[in-house]
Image (tube, rainbow, N blue to C red):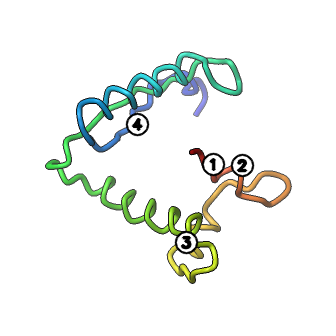
Amino acid sequence: MNGQHETKTHVVCEARGAKEDDDLELAFRRVCDGDNRTGKPYPFEIVINDKKANTEGLQICDLMARSIGLSVLRPEQGNRAFAVLRGKFFSGASGAIEGNGLKIVP
């Protein structure tokens, strides 16, 4: 991995609509240009795929996003899928995923 910290990494997102896609791309580019907690640019490039592409990776993301979202919106409800995913999040020194690997934004 030596020397790869500046290699471009593509982040693939599913298209939602022209306005939403434009807003997402603008926000993404701001963060990658240094408007982030480190103040440094990130070597990411956004790729917005059409829903009709039905990409396997995006299908998995949809399944994960639903179980993660439900764990936040209905924390008292049982959620076996999130129980499996919880151990995959970065937890930091404290062991908490909230604020580390799990970021909740409005």
* Residue of label 2: 99
What amino acid type is highlighted by mark number 2? Gly
Furthest residue in direction right, as rendered: 94
* Residue of label 1: 103
Q: Quadrant of residue 50?
A: top left
Secondary structure state at the residue bearing disc 1 = loop
Task: Check contact, mark 2 vs mark 1: CB within 8 A.
Answer: yes
Ranked by sequence position, the earlier of labels 4 and 1 is 4
Residue 101 image point, x, y percent: 65, 51
Q: Residue shown at 32%/26% (left/top)? A: 22
Ranked by sequence position, the earlier of labels 4 and 2 is 4
Secondary structure state at the residue bearing disc 4 = strand
**Distance from label 2 to label 1 (Cα)?**
5 Å
**Distance from label 3 to label 1 (Cα)?**
15 Å
**Distance from label 4 to label 2 (Cα)?**
21 Å
Q: Quadrant of the C terminus?
A: top right
* Residue of label 4: 11
**Distance from label 4 to label 1 (Cα)?**
17 Å
Say the numbered circle drawn on residue 29.
none
What amino acid type is highlighted by mark number 3? Phe
Q: Is residue 42 above or below residue 71?
A: above
Which residue is more in the foreground, 38 or 23? 23
